[in-house]
């Protein structure tokens, strides 16, 4: 038994101690191989260490925008502002009553009637101002006649005074042959005649200036009366509004009785209230808001495809005409910015109407937007 234990102990002492082996790198494993095999191993290792991944080519991204159709040429028609239309008590200007109004969607030509207001008070005011103007003209004519008569009377008085001075001067001829009393009397008469003539000349000059001032006052009143008449006549003319261009009538919606509604004949409106638009339906465009993330992909001149939301089957070609360089903050968040883009629409169509919603498709990846 003791011999067996001794043998086991001797075997344990003479046995080699095990060494822990760690995994080696690819380069270390490659260095243990033969030269011929090393080249092939290195090649495989290089390929596996730097793999080349082929990514698929990106597809063309399409930017989709939403906007509203608007006319390139249009004319806003508002209720006319009456010159001097304030009430005598200092209250607001009187309202206007619509007596004739063009039908919504009607096609009109230049010069056609769009809206007409009741102009009875304007015509009455114009006639009153005309009467005042003609009354001032009559006063000026009367003043002219009176001044001519007064001027003639003054000239006659001056002529008589001049003749009196000449007679007094003749009476002094040969004064050395006259008696002293007679000579002194004639000298006094001459001095009185000369004083009267000087007084008449001074008075005539002052009266002439006064007559000129009175006439100028009447002329100023005449000019003011004429301006008042012209304003009143212009107010009466503004009560009838005609179309400045050929186009489509689009009635505006205004707030009345708690709701938004279009104006109608017989209603009262305040001066300056928008009533309708006349739009040229032959040339339309689309105005849209572009997100700040997409603005870098757009450039003027890009071709786009426009589709009307109301008529999905109708599409139109267009191009980006302008892109605002200044962004505006969104109403939802100040961090979100949008840019205004305007797209032109090629061709004409009866379905292209103002304020219709439209979708715009832009392909920035296409060369030049073509």
Image (cartoon, helix red, strand yellow):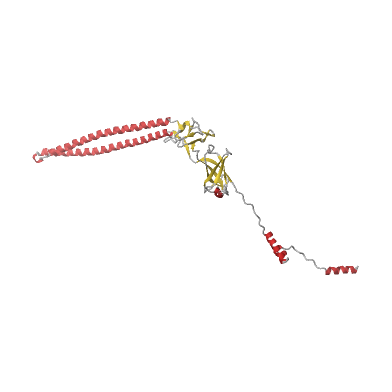
Task: Say if residue 14 shows up in the picture.
Answer: yes
Identity of the residue furthest to the left in this view: 177
Number of numbered markers:
0
Name the side, left or right, on which 62 lies relative to 96: right
Above or below residue 75? Residue 17 is: below
Residue toward you, 345 or 43? 43
Name the side, left or right, on which 251 lies relative to 168: right
Quadrant containing the N terminus is bottom right
Residue toward you, 236 or 173? 236
**Residue at x 26% of width, y 37% of height:** 208
Residue toward you, 218 or 367? 367
Above or below residue 311? Residue 25 is: below
Above or below residue 56? Residue 79 is: above
Task: Say if residue 274 shows up in the picture.
Answer: no
Identity of the residue furthest to the right in this view: 1
> How far across and down, in percent of the image, does residue 136 sit?
33, 33
Identity of the residue furthest to the front in this view: 36
> How far across and down, in percent of the image, does residue 34 sit?
73, 66
> How far across and down, in percent of the image, does residue 370 sit?
55, 47
> How far across and down, in percent of the image, does residue 23 sit?
74, 62
Name the side, left or right, on which 236 lies relative to 47: left
Q: Quadrant of residue 191?
A: top left
């Amino acid at each position: 038994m003791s011999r067996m234990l001794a043998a086991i102990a001797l075997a344990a002492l003479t046995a080699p101690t095990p060494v822990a082996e760690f995994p080696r790198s690819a380069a270390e494993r490659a260095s243990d191989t033969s030269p011929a095999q090393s080249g092939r191993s290195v090649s495989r290792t290089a390929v596996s260490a730097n793999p080349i991944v082929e990514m698929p080519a990106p597809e063309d991204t399409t930017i989709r925008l939403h906007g509203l159709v608007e006319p390139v040429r249009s004319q806003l028609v508002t209720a006319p502002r009456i010159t001097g239309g304030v009430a005598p008590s200092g209250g607001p200007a009187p309202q206007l009553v619509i007596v004739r109004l063009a039908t919504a969607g009607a096609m009109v030509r230049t010069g056609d009637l769009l809206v007409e207001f009741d102009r009875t008070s304007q015509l009455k005011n114009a006639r009153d101002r005309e009467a005042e103007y003609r009354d001032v003209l009559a006063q000026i004519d009367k003043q002219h006649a009176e001044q001519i008569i007064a001027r003639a009377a003054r000239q006659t008085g001056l002529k008589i005074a001049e003749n009196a001075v000449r007679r007094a001067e003749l009476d002094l001829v040969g004064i050395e042959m006259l008696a002293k009393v007679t000579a002194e009397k004639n000298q006094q008469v001459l001095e009185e005649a000369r004083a009267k003539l000087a007084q008449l000349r001074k008075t005539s000059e002052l009266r002439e200036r006064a007559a000129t001032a009175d006439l100028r006052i009447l002329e100023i009143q005449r000019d003011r009366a004429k301006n008042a008449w012209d304003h009143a006549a212009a107010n009466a003319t503004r009560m009838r509004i005609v179309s400045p261009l050929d186009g489509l009538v689009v009635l505006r919606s205004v707030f009345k009785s708690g709701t938004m509604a279009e104006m109608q004949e017989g209603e009262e409106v305040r001066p300056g209230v928008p009533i309708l638009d006349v739009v040229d339906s032959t040339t339309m465009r689309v105005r849209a808001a572009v997100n700040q993330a997409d603005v870098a992909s757009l450039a003027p001149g890009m071709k786009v495809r426009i589709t009307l939301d109301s008529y999905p089957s109708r599409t139109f070609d267009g191009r980006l005409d302008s892109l605002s360089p200044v962004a505006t903050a969104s109403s939802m968040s100040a961090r979100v910015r949008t840019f205004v883009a305007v797209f032109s629409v090629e061709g004409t169509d009866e379905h292209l109407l103002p304020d219709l919603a439209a979708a715009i498709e832009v392909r920035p990846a296409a060369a030049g937007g073509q």
